[in-house]
Amino acid sequence: MELISDIAFNSVYPSSEIRKEKEIILDEINSYKDSPSELIFDEFEELLSTEPDRRNILGSEERLKAYMETDIRGFIHRNYATDQMVVSSVATLPLKN
């Protein structure tokens, strides 16, 4: 539990790693744009529904480039509070022959 707590509440977000991850996501966005059939299908689905879970998760290049370490820390602070977490553990027993 101590390790899980440390990961959840004391994670670090080095600028170099954030930069690398942004590059990976930008590659994914560009790859997505190179597939017109996926683009058309997703745009059609967005027109049919206003539900947030129906929107494209990649976002835009401009918005991605604007994200900073402080934005990530703010997101974590808002969404990963102890009153919003459930930790469970499951032990399995070996099958008997």
Image (spheres, rainbow, N blue to C red):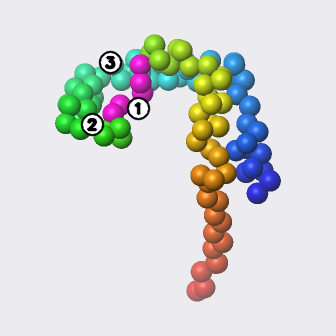
Image coords of residue 84 (percent x, y): 59, 52
Q: Is residue 25 magenta?
A: no
Which of 95/79 is in front?
Answer: 79
Element at label 1: loop
Q: Would you name the residue on which mark 1 appears?
A: 57
The prevailing secondary structure element of the residues shown in magenta is: loop
Residues at badges 1 and 2 in contact (C-beta under 8 Å)?
A: no
**Is the Cβ of the residue at disc 2 closer than 8 Å to that at disc 3?**
no
| Measured Cα–Cα span from mark 3 to mark 1 | 16 Å
**Is residue 27 shown left or right of residue 78?**
left
Q: Residue at x 19, y 36 (%)?
A: 48
Q: Which amino acid does the dot numbered 3 rest on?
A: Asp
Q: Identify residue for label 2.
A: 50
What range of the chain is rendered magenta? Answer: 55-60
> Which residue is depicted at the point 46% across and 13% down?
62
**Circle 3 Cα neighbour tier, 10 Å, few/some/many (<14 / 14–19 / ≥20):** few
